[in-house]
Amino acid sequence: MKRKLVIGTFWLSFANLFSKILGIIYIIPWLAMMGSQQNGLEAQALYNVAYVPYALFLTLGTAGFPSAIAKQVAEYNGKNNFRTSLKVLKVSGLLMTVTGIISAIMMYILAPTLAKNSPISNIEDAILCIRSLCPSLAIIPILSVFRGFFQGNNDLKPFSLSQVLEQLGRIIFILGFTFFILQINHGNIAQAVKLSTFASFIGGMLALLYLIIYVYKRRLIYQEKLRSSLPELPISTKQLIGSIVMESIPFVIIGSAITLTQLIDQLMLKEILILKGGFTLKGIEFLFSQSSANPNKLTALIIALSASVGGASLPLIAEIGNRNQEELERAIADSLRMTLMMLLPMSIGLMILSQPAYRLIFGPDKQGGNYLVIAVLAAIIFSLFTAMFTIIQSLGEHRMALIYFGFGLITKIILQLPCIYFLEGYGANIASVISFGLVTVLAYKRLTTKYKIMPLYYVRSNITRVLIGSFVMGIICFIFAQSLKQFFNIDSWLSSLLYSSIIASVGVFVYGIIVFRKTAKKYYLAFKSR
């Protein structure tokens, strides 16, 4: 069980990490082509005003379905019924095609309303950028069906590689389109951003083509599974669609949680700051980039890695269910342990390096670095929320998940007004920390009570080592960072890179020594005895 979780987590973590790193690095040349830092902030605001609602529509149209498909496929495979698993793939493919087209049409129609209520100065440009993402909404849901099928079969390599290919294709075309528009055609920023958003469709097509080829190459393996499978269960297409939809709805709602909160921030920031007074539309647009759009790009890496563990553990926990309490406790404990093992050191490190990290990607901006610290704190809470609610839904506790999520969302909306009014750029993330931190604790307490398990206590020695390692690493890195600051000019890109590399290397070394010393010692003695 642990081996499957480790292998699955490796592939999902690799894909998420590599994709997110690419998604951060490309911003450097992309912003450089924009010219001034002010143009960069304008481009970032315009891009994110389009991308946040797109991400929400995409999540509503796809996020729950792969998880639901994976859960059903895993359950049927566990009963040696690959024939029914294959029927799930075919039916869900048809369903997702329709869902994708509906999502694309809805976003096209709602584009003017979304643009009007977003923190952007040019509404017409925002409408065009939002609508340029509609073709991608029609194709990505089909891609998600294949990913859900592979996830359910614990074959996470194609799942992961398709993510990397999608990101690579998107970035290559973003940079290519931007260079052509701004450097060769001498167009404007809005035109460049419009084509940059359209690049998501091209990346999706490349990933879909790869998965189709992968399925074709493995057709003999699937044929063998069909021969050894039990007869297909007598489930009609209508029943199967109903089952997938009912299974998906909670996954859709919970899967859209982070994106939904970001959209709430986007739509409420402008109105609350106008109510407070003292802000121009351009000033709100720049504040949105500094406090939300830009930090979210860096913290997405943290959330994605945590989600990788949840994605890998979902079919494993679903297979166990209520059959074996000890195995269930062990599987949940391993999932939470691995989440914390990656989450805490990365978050603490990014907090300490907030100023140079922000400078490396977005240019010199001390205030932006300050906003990043609070955004990382919110990312920790969102990561724990994602891990906890994935576990709950793997066990079929959808009602519990929806109740707690609804409570968290209402709390978030109530806190928005006072937090943003008094704390401005910091307010939205602080509201998220309080509301989602609360529901995550409540959900864990409910899980332990209902299933009579104590997963964190089960791996208490590992968790303690991770906490100590993260704390000691943070103290040492902070001391190093303060000591070396006088020798480096953080406003310089090269200097920030060297400074960040040194501190990060120290952090990795210290954390590795504390957390992985037993494993390292075991391998060293094995090597020495040869």
Image (cartoon, rainbow, N blue to C red):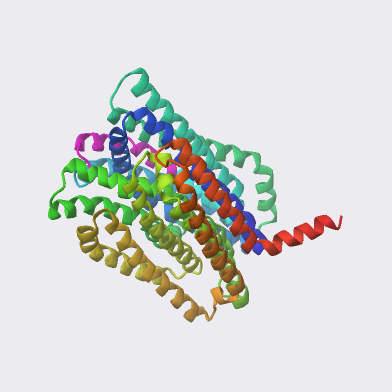
Q: Which of 502 and 32 lies nearest the eye of the viewer?
A: 502
In the image, is residue 142 part of the stretch drawn in magenta?
no
Q: Main secondary structure of the magenta part?
A: helix
Q: Give percent across and percent down for residue 68.
A: 48, 58
Residue 85 seen by the camera: yes
Horizontally, is 442 left or right of 81 in the view? left
Q: Which of 328 and 126 lies nearest the eye of the viewer?
A: 126
Say if 177 sits above or below 382 in the image.
above
Q: Give percent across and percent down for residue 76.
A: 58, 61
In the image, is residue 127 part of the stretch drawn in magenta?
yes
Tell me where the magenta segment starts and ends, as one range.
120-141
Horizontally, is 32 left or right of 190 in the view? right
Q: Which of 463 and 321 lies nearest the eye of the viewer?
A: 463
Q: Give percent across and percent down for residue 193.
A: 33, 33
Q: Give percent across and percent down for residue 51.
A: 34, 43
Say if 28 sits above or below 413 in the image.
above
Horizontally, is 290 left or right of 139 in the view? left
- Which residue is depicted at the point 44% across and 77% down? 446
Where, by quadrant of the figure, is residue 78 drawn?
bottom right
Horizontally, is 416 left or right of 76 in the view? left
Residue 307 seen by the camera: no
Where, by quadrant of the figure, is residue 229 drawn?
bottom right
Q: Which of 79 and 61 lies nearest the eye of the viewer?
A: 61
- Which residue is depicted at the point 44% across and 37% down? 493
- Which residue is depicted at the point 20% across and 36% down? 122
> The C terminus lies in which quarter of the figure?
bottom right
> The N terminus lies in which quarter of the figure?
bottom right
- Which residue is depicted at the point 45% across and 60% down? 383
